[in-house]
Amino acid sequence: MAYHSIMSDVHHVYKKCTVGNNIEKDNLRSGTGGKRLCKTCQEIRDGKRSR
Ligand SMILES: [Zn+2]
């Protein structure tokens, strides 16, 4: 479920994440990549943003 961009130092867990949505397919990889969770995904998880 987790995914990340090789161009970024964060990973995402929600498909709705606006940051994750902007990842170009060429840079998209599955898994966390050992990176920290993206702030927007954290906010979705914490209920600060609608899913
Ligand atoms: Zn995210």
Image (cartoon, helix red, strand yellow):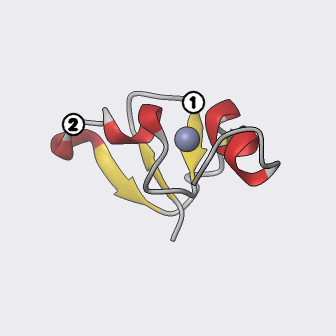
In front: 30, or 13?
Answer: 13
Q: Residue furthest toward the bottom?
A: 1
Left or right of 32 in this view: 48: right
Comparing labels 1 and 2, the label whose residue is closer to the camera: 2
Left or right of 27 in this view: 7: right
Q: Which mark is residue 50?
A: none
Residue 40 placement (x, y as % from top left): 63, 34
Label 2 element class: loop
Q: Which amino acid type is shown beneath numbered disc 1?
A: Asp
Is 30 rendered above or below residue 27?
A: below
- Image quadrant in which you'd find residue 35: top right
Residue 36 placement (x, y as % from top left): 71, 41
Q: Which residue is mark 1?
A: 9
Q: Residue furthest toward the left?
A: 26
Look at 17% across and 43% down and name the residue there: 26
Label 1 element class: loop
In front: 18, or 9?
Answer: 18
Q: Residue furthest toward the right?
A: 46
Q: Which mark is residue 24?
A: 2
In front: 50, or 43?
Answer: 50
Task: Say few, some or many: other residues with alpha carbon within 10 Å of mark 2 (under 14 / 14 to 19 / 20 or more).
Answer: few
Residue 20 placement (x, y as % from top left): 42, 40
Q: Which amino acid type is shown beneath numbered disc 2?
A: Glu
Left or right of 33 in this view: 47: right
Label 1 beta carbon less than 8 Å to ligand 1: no
Q: Earlier in the sequence, mark 1 or mark 2?
A: 1
Image quarter for ligand 1 = top right
Look at 51% across and 71% down and name the residue there: 1
Left or right of 41 in this view: 47: right
